[in-house]
Each structure stands twice: as structure tokens, then as C-alpha cells.
Amino acid sequence: MRITAISGVLRRLASTRLTLLWMLLLALGAALSYDNPEDTSIWVLIVPMLLLAVNLIAAIISNPRINRRGGLLVFHLGLLSIVVLAAIGRLTHMDGRVEIISGAAFSPELVTDVHSGPWHNGALADVSFVQGPFTVEYRPQIMRGLTHSQVALSDNEGGWREVVVGDDRPLLVEGYRFYTTFNKGFAPILSWTSQNGRVTETGAVHMPSYPLFDFKQSNSWTPQGGDEIKFWLQLEAGLTAEEAWVLDGRHATGTLVVNVSGVRTELLPGQRVEMAGGTLRYEQLTTWMGYKLFYDPTLQWMFLAAFITIGGLSAHFWRKLAAEPLGLDDALRHEKRHAKKPLPASRSAA
Amino acid sequence: MTELPWLYAGLAAYALAVLVAFVGVGRLGATMATVGGVGSISESQRNNERLVLSLMATSVILLTITLADRWLRIGHGPFVNLFELLISQLFSLGLVYTIAYWLIPVLRTTSVVVLPLMGVLAVWVLVIEPSDSVFPPTYHNPWLWAHVGFGKFFLAFCLIGTGLAGVMLLRSYAFFSKLFRHLPDNVILDKLAWRFMLLALVFDSLMLCAGAVWAQDAWGRYWAWDALETSSFLNWLLLGASIHARTTYNVPIRLGAVLIISVLVFAFVTYFGTPFYSEAAHKGVI
């Protein structure tokens, strides 16, 4: 009795009418999710997907037209696995942004704009690489071309292995993917020594993205015990808008204009300036590369599931079509017959 | 732009193919009227079909030269602006339809539906600026080829299905009923049309998957509900739901034909509308 009742419930849940209804609901949710508007809840997608998943599970269990046909079963199980993997992916994912100067090592503290799922459990602390120099090719009219970013990876035996990443070739470390972005620029390395000599700090001031903000290479910094210092970088990077050009920080020079309380000083690398609270030294000019960071442990499984799903669908169609003759040969024979004599009136009308 | 003469020659061959196809089907109708509403496939009609096939093949060859010449001149394939996409689609739709026209004789009459639909693209390509494009850095990826290739087959199979659907719908009018009298029953055409839509579903699914792999490589996410992704997904859902309805319920032939045409219309908007009304085809690309 109980089994009959369960079967009845399963059959209702597996209704093909419900499938169409939930597909319609999912289409509505997808339309509302277009461009990820902030005022649309993620539930407009999750609810129809859950309903479709229930419908699918019930159909797989109770519908012999699905569970007795290998290809169709693989297709439906594949669809279900894609939904499950997408959900796991969202729960465990992480994305963020990071800017790293050439010659510096990656550190998790540098990552900003972080979004991660509640089950994210990646080993970001184990990610180790050192940013090397990079080049970006530009066509005339400053049209960005290929990016080649050199990165040194630890080989876990005390040595380093150089790789070049860029554009659609991300750096893959510990399951994290680092994608180069259009966001990159110059960074003067500065040393600050307080007047009493007790505080010494060295760091880089990241100037705005270059050449996007070629006209606005300015930033500011407040050292410990000092006043706010405003910087403006006068760059010589070889940029010519009319010709093809390669952005290469190794061939760029920059004069740093330092402004404290209205007092303006120009510094070349190696020069220093005394100011209230201490001494600022312009050590050298370097570059920074902005990466987009992405982590999703389900990616490979999703890839596999998607192509197995399509394989199942194709196999099902192949078998189905082979088993059900179209009748086209008969139709063609019919056509050939009537190439010699008129069509019978009974077959002539549509 | 050295490729333009080849393009115009290709479109001229294509226009001739449309003309000959219509004249051929028209003659067939006239023959039927002469013999009192009963028609037959004559040798002259066969010659007419051969001429249409030759003209379509010539058009495809000339469009191939157009694409190759442009590729050599600007250094990249036809993947970026609308002008390139239209030539590329005219080439691929023309190629697949020409092969289908050659191999499946029943499809030949559908040329009066399919060729005018392709004609929309041909006229469109003539009225837009044939500007050069810049190849985005994220397009140097083999998955782009897979994505675009699968998409071309998807659209071509939708187009062939629509040709059959159009014939089935037009048959309800007396004039077209006579023209299409030599074709098999609608039941058989309906089955054939849906077989092409099954193929379209497989290739649409492959296109979405290949596109997702490319998107992951190119922009660090496999799906982001941007304009083109949302439109493609809705197109896939519409096609999937249509096939689901067709295989589960006894969908009337005419309603089935309308569903097939709806899928092509949606695909047309997705391919040629969405990338150009949204600010960026895929964010951060162009």
C-alpha cells in the first residue's frame, strides 16, 4: 500500500506537464537574471532549478521511458548532476582581485573585493608565486593586444619554474586561477625614514591603470609620523597613439613629482627629499599587474558532466532515429514513380 | 577592401539561385495546373534543381574566397563585427543547406522558404559598413572555434527545420498546396523537420558548453548571465521545451511548425540582435 502511495506521489512529481511549467519558470528566472540586476534575487533561478531537479529525480525513478533507455537516462542524470555541481560550485567558490608589483610575491592579504561561498575551503595560503615583468602589445589607436606576464612558481624543491600567462591562459595554482586583466600600471618604490631614524618603511605606490589613465598618474600616501604626500608620475613609456606599441615596464622611466603642503619636488630614482617628519627616497620605478582571482573546485567535473550529458542525448537520438524509419525512402520512391506518371489524387493533397 | 568584389559576386550567384528556385517551383505549379491539379517531377524540373544547386555551390565558393581574402588582409577570422558575422553565417548556412539540398531531394522545394530567409542576411550585409575589426586578445582560444562551429551547425539545422515547417504551414493555402503537391505528406515532413531540430538541440548544447569553457578561459567565469548568455540559454530552453512537448504530447503538426519557426526567430535575434544592442557582447571583450 505504502509503495503504491509513494509511486503515485513520484508519478505526480515526475509529471511532464510540470517539466514544461518549471522550464517556463526557469526561463522567466533567466530573463529576470539578465545582467545580474541587484534588485533580482538569486532565488528566481534557484527555485525553478530545484523544482526541475525534483521533477527530474522523480522521472528518473518512476518513468520507464527514461530509466529503461540508457542514453536518455544518462542525459537526465547528467542534467541533474550539472544542477548539483553548479550549486556546489556556488557554495565553495571564491573570486577576488589582486594587484602584484613586479618582483614581489603573492600574498593572500593583497586580495581585495573578495566574494566566496560559505563552504569555501581552498588553500589560498599555500599559493606561492613571484610576479615577474610583463609586456602588453598595443595596436595603433591604443587597442590592447596580447598580454605576456612572467610568473615564477615554486617547484617545491627549493627552485623556481618560470611560466608566462596572459589573457585566456590563467595561472593555475592550488586550484586558484589568476587571470591577467586590462588593469595594470606603474608603481614607484619608496623608502621612508622618520626624522629620529626609528621608523623605516619601504613600499610601492600603485599609480592608476596605464595607459587607460595616462593623463592621471597620481596618488597619495601618508607615512608614519609624516604628513600626507601627493605624488604625480611623469612617465616616459614610449606610448604613441598612432603606432603599434609594447608596454614594457623595463623600458620605461619616470620622474616622481612629490608635493607636501604645497611644496613641489621632482625626484629621479635614487634621489631623496627631506620633509617634515622624515626623509622620502624614490628607490626605483616598477610595474604592477592586476589579476582576477577565481576558484571553483567543480569546474572539471562540470565539464565532464556537460559533455557526458550531451553524449547521452546524442546516443538516445541515434538509437531512436535508427529504430524509427522516417518513411522518406518510401516518399522518395513515391516521388520517383510520379516522375513518370501523374500523382494519384488521394496522396496529392497535404 | 579586396574581398568586396568576391562578396558581391557571391551574393549575385545567391540571388540567381533564389530566382531560379522560385521559377522552378512556379513552373512545377503551372505544370500541375495544366494537368488538372495533378503534378509530376519532370526532367526540366530536375535540371532546374541542378541549376539551383550549382548556383548555391558557386555562391558558397565565392563567399569562401571572400572570407579567405579578408582573413589574409586583416589577419584574423570573421568573429568580431556584424559585417564579418553576416558573411560568415551566409557562408556556413549556405554550405550546410547546399549539402542538404544535394543529399536529401525532399528538401529541395524548401528552397523557396530557406533562400529568402538567407536573403535577409544577404541584404543586411549589403547595407552595413564593411569595416575592419580588431581581434580581442581573449579570442586567441581554440574553444572559440568550437563554440562558433557548433553554433553554425545549430543555426543551419534550425534553418532547414524551418524550411520544412514553412512548407507545412504554406500548404494550408490552396496556391502553395498545388506547388508542394509532389512532396510527401506533412506527417513525414514533420518527422524530418523534428529530426533536424533534434540535431539542432545537440549542437546548441555543444555550443553552450564550448562557449562556457571559452568564457572560463577568457574572462574567468563560465556563466555570468550577460545578454548573449541569457538569450542563448532561453533559446536552448525554448528548443528543449519544444522537443519535450513534441515527444511527450500529440502536438498538432501546424503548432509544431510554429514552434520550429519560433526557435529560429529566437536564434536569429540571439545571433544578430543581442550582441549588437547590448553594450558588450560578452563583458570585457570588445
Image (spheres, coloured by chain):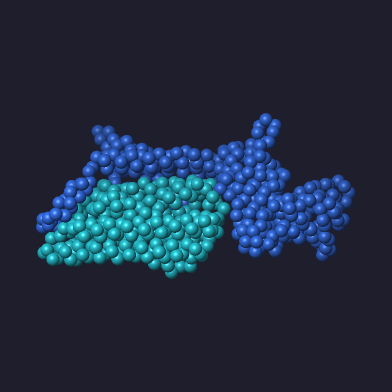
Instruction: Left or right? Give the position of B228 relative to A60.
Output: right
**A185 vs B4: above or below:** above
Residue nearest the viewer, comparing A290 with A67:
A290
Q: Percent position (x, y) of residue A25?
A: 37, 53
Where, quadrant-wise, is the C terminus of chain A in this rendering? bottom left
Q: Residue at x 81, y 50 (%)?
A: A283
The vertical placement of B273 against A107, above or below, is below
Which residue is nearer to you in this view: A27 or A143? A143
Residue in the image at 49% along x and 63% along y: B2
Tell whether A47 sits left or right of A1. right
The answer to whether residue B74 shows anywhere in this view is yes
Find the residue positioned furthest to the top. Answer: A157
Residue A132: x %, y % from top left: 69, 45
* Chain with colour blue in the figure: A
**Residue B188 drawn at (x, y percent):** 21, 51
Q: Quadrant of residue A261?
A: bottom right
Q: Which chain is cyan?
A: B
Can you see residue B78?
A: no
Q: Is residue B242 left or right of residue A270?
A: left
Q: Is residue A207 left or right of residue A62?
A: right
Percent across and percent down for residue B50 are 27, 57
Nearer to us in this view, A290 or A44: A290
View extreme (right): residue: A196
**Residue, far bottom:** B127
**Residue drawn at (55%, 40%) of the image:** A120
Residue at the spot x=27%, y=51% of the render?
Answer: B104
